[in-house]
Image (cartoon, helix red, strand yellow):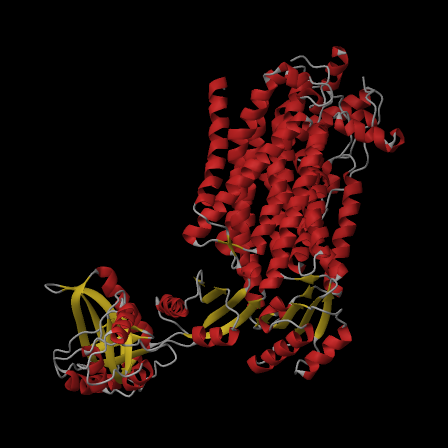
Amino acid sequence: MTTTPIVTSRRGFFQTLRDIYHEKTNFDFVGRSWLWAIISGTALLASMAALALSGLNLGIDFEGGSQWQLTVSGKTPAVADVRDVVEEAGALEAKVLLLGDDGVRVQSAELGDKAQARVTEALAEYGQVDAGDVSVTDVGPTWGDRISRKALVALLVFFVLIAIYLTFRFEGKMALAALSAVVHDIIITVGVYAITGFEVTPATVIAFLTILGFSLYDTVVVFDKISENTPTVGAARGDTYSAMVNRSMNSVLMRSLNTSFVALLPVASLLVVGSGFLGAVTIRDFALALFVGLLVGAYSSIFVATPILAWMKEREPRYRALRDRSAAHMARAGVAPAQPSPDDAAEVEPGTMPPAPPRPPGAVAPRPRQQRRKRRR
Amino acid sequence: MTLRRLKTYLVVTILVAFAGVAGVVAAGDEPVLGLDLQGGISIAYEAVGQARPGALDVARDIIEERVNGLGVSQAEITREDRTITVNLPGVSNRDEAARIVGQTGELRFRGVLAVVGPKGQEPEEASTTTSSGAVAPTTTTTTTPPSQEALRAAIKACDTETVSAALAAGEQIPTTSFEDNKRKDCVVLRERESRNRIYLGPTEATGGIVQNANSEFAPGQGYAVNVNFTSEGSVEFDTIAAKYVQQQLAIVLDDRIQSAPVIQEASFQGTAQITGDFTVDEADELAKVINYGALPVRLEKLNTVSLSPTLGRDQLDAGIAAGAIGLILVAGYMLIYYRLLGAVVIAGLLLTGMLTYALITFLGSTVNLALDLAGVTGLIVSIGVAVDSYVVYFERLKDEVRTGKTVRSSVDRGFTRSFRTILAADLVSIIGAAALFFVAAGSVRGFAFFLGLSTFLDLLVGYFFMHPAVSLLARRPALVRMRGVGIAAGLDAPGVQT
């Protein structure tokens, strides 16, 4: 009875893709929790280490200072030339950055109004443009704190509201699992910025907040399927909560991949166009954070949120009983008992997955739908 | 759902979308672009020190009055807690803007010299006089009217005779500009919420003499404003009162005359009551203004951004290009993946796009909602959110069809179930957008608004277009069965019955 084939890499990449499309896959998502735990754990540790060691490269909106940006006409700007020009005008130790072929961005410590106007004039002369065509940003030292604090408050409100909504719509444990996945996404995205040293701007913060929504969107789609299938747990012999989760995951896999892919397409084009276009730096800032966040979000709804949920649910008495019965059933059938009791994994840090050994192939219940398909043919 | 109902939904949705776009196009409106896209200046201020309740609103109103005086169209002045943000699209002289906007407004008491009357049609009158004068020169005029320059100087120097002569001669009396409104000079200023102007004497006292003010209902006299003076202020005010008994004393904040009551007594001993035909709101407002004057809010510049229109244009172009490319990629993928159903996605996206354009343009012309770069990005991102709904529905259809049902019978059941999922997921997005909108500041708000708006539209289009369209298509066996491109092919069910 336990003869359903398990999809492995030996079946070939394209065959696997075909299986995903026809929803014939039978991946053991929950059983391989240990693998996802290692992947996510490594990424989380690396992120936090990078954050602690090198920190974030905060833009002038957070640090305070003056910034000029212009598109030079008639020549190709050179960093050294621009630096000479602005230093002569009074902006010492300025940071000069070339954007595309003819874009120039200069950042310096905050200057007085007069010095700032001098630098603007000098840059306009250098770039052969009107002074009005030079964008000037002047940020006081407290501005950054203010917007960061507001973003943090927004984040907290967001978490509370979403937790309430998910608890009401699904259940508390699902809310907890979904939000754990979001925290996972945030840490890793911030980590990517710490590791790569990309500048953090207000645009990045906005993008960041979007990611939360997206990550949750995917998770909600998966959880909706799981909560729909929950009443069927234990209907078949040897069925467990984890097996039901696996069933649900496999049936929404294509949906999840598709929604993530479709969301990534416009963002990818933002990233490419933003990097290609001359002055479109803000767009690039947005797109980078979105792109990283979406990828991580797509991963986490499948490999973080769901295993955490399964792990929490398996500790509920009724599902534990089911699991014990299933193990006994397996033993009778001559298969080694499946997993140790979840208590063994009790010391796991929140936010990471419980380390669970891989299960023997037979632990996954056959999908009735496929049998029906076969019959129809 | 009945066939008729489905058709109605479909037709109404399409009509609404087209009517919306036609409406804004006919009105000649275009989306209002934010500062970062059209260029301009944005300055954020923070109130320094303690401020009385309502004082920050008065500070905001002062800035609004001044900016309107500059003739900047679509200026936007917003207050969030202690921060006041001033957006001046199309303005490029940041020094001048900062100087005019950032100054602390002062409450001044000035004596009334003469009522000048509204500005009205004076320029026209002036031109007719000159033209008629040129055609038929008369000898009746003995004095040549003073030039506007000379008149300005006379006003400033409190030369009452010249000014009243000019007034009697029907000359155009210039209003004193913001720069010329000096404490010691005489000025011509406008009355609040009226076109009437008054010629005022030099400042007798500033808001510093006031301790506080409050409004109350005085039996028999209607709503009144009580003003309490400080101990030194009381002495000072009594001196002024003695000078202006039975004359008008104007209370001026910045460039606006707030009220010009007649002083009834020579001595007040610390408290005065202003009465008139005040409504509750007027009395409250006057009390608020006087309180502000007692302790003006000093504003400190937090940040200034001046944005070049050419850079803004580049960003907009990049955003539009990215949006178009993203749409084409998504449309192509949907067609390949879902075949005929992919066309429903494309039509749905077009409808959503039209509705979004109409709404943004409408909100731009009514409540001055500006589309900034964060908003453009939010819209591009929302393409993904919108298409997700179709994917969720179509994948659900696949599930239904796989259980052996016909496409036609799966459509409704699949929709009921998948719409629950879509609703749950979209609600998460909307809750998130709402949290951002109400808590965050500046461009984050714009972004949240556009994301929330497009998610909401996505729900509407999903319910009133996606389902009816798919349902109607699924009723045509030929479309379902079409080899390779039909609905069944897109649902991975080539052999299914219709």
Is residue A301 found left or right of B168 in the rendered image? Answer: right
Q: Nearer the viewer, residue A108 or A377?
A: A108
Q: Nearer the viewer, residue A222 or A268?
A: A268
Q: Is residue B18 left or right of residue B58?
A: right
Q: Is B314 located above or below residue B234 in the figure?
A: above
What is the residue that sits farthest to the right in this orientation? A10
Q: Is residue B344 above or below residue B46?
A: above
- Residue A220's spot in the image, x, y percent? 61, 37
In the rendered view, does A243 fall on the left or right side of B174? right
Occupied quadrant, residue A30: top right
Judge whether residue A171 can be spotted in this image. no
Pick the front one: A343 or B438 = B438
Up the image or down, B371 lies above or below A125; here it is: above
The x and y percentages for residue A361 are: 83, 27
Q: Which residue is at 71% across, 73% downward? A: A95
Q: Is residue B286 left or right of residue A112?
A: left
Residue B174 image position (x, y, % from top left): 30, 76
The quarter of the image holding the C terminus of chain B is top right
The answer to whether residue A312 of the structure is visible from this angle is yes
* Residue A333 coordinates in the image, percent (x, y): 82, 19
